[in-house]
Image (cartoon, rainbow, N blue to C red):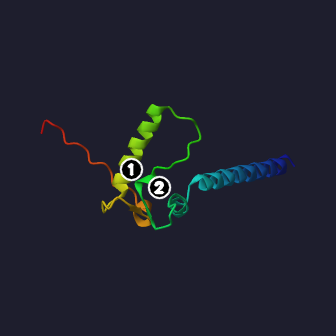
Amino acid sequence: MSQLRLALLSLVFVGIATSLYAAEEKKADAKKADPEKVFKRLDKNADGSLTWEEFKVRPSKTEKTAEETKKQETRLKTLFARMDQDKDKKVTLEEYKKPAPAKKKKKAAAE
């Protein structure tokens, strides 16, 4: 009888653990933004490309200092330039969905 209880408790535990894991996976998937939806939301004039003015608009959940705002803008400019692979000063959906090319590492001065 005690083995049966132990088996049932084990099954209940496994069921609860599986449910919690599935809930966490669903929550993680919900946090990942769909690139096409984000692109369409940013593309204010719906022309199929993002200009710098459209790209730099990012809602902030917290107030930022002027220094933090400037750092964020610098990072966004760098990202925009890396994403704009054809250098036409616009980012298309295809460019937006592709991973931005990695930064080129500076060669060591002592070669």
**Residue receiving disc 2:** 54
In the displayed structure image, the side of residue 99 where residue 11 appears, left or right: right
In this view, the residue in front, 70 or 28, is 70
In this view, the residue in front, 38 or 29, is 38
In the displayed structure image, the side of residue 62 where residue 110 appears, left or right: left
- Label whose residue precedes the other's in the sequence (2 or 1): 2
Residue lying at the far right in this picture: please name it.
1
Residue 50: image location, x then y, percent: 44, 60
Residue 70 position (above or below residue 14): above
Question: Residue at left 22%, top 42%?
Answer: 106
**Residue receiving disc 1:** 79
- Residue type highlighted by circle 1: Leu
Residue at mark 2 to residue at mark 1: CA–CA distance: 14 Å
Say what secondary structure mark 2 lies in.
helix
Say what secondary structure mark 1 lies in.
helix
Question: How many residues crowd around disc 1 within 10 Å: few (fewer than 14), some, or many (20 or more)?
Answer: some
Question: Residue at left 65%, top 55%?
Answer: 26
In which image quadrant can residue 52 be found? bottom left
Residue 38: image location, x then y, percent: 53, 58
In which image quadrant can residue 63 be found? top right
In this view, the residue in front, 30 or 12, is 30
Question: Residue at left 52%, top 48%?
Answer: 58
Residue 48 position (above or below residue 58): below
- Residue type highlighted by circle 2: Glu
Residue 60: image location, x then y, percent: 56, 42
In this view, the residue in front, 2 or 53, is 53
Question: Residue at left 50%, top 50%?
Answer: 57
In the displayed structure image, the side of residue 51 where residue 105 appears, left or right: left
Residue 4: image location, x then y, percent: 83, 51
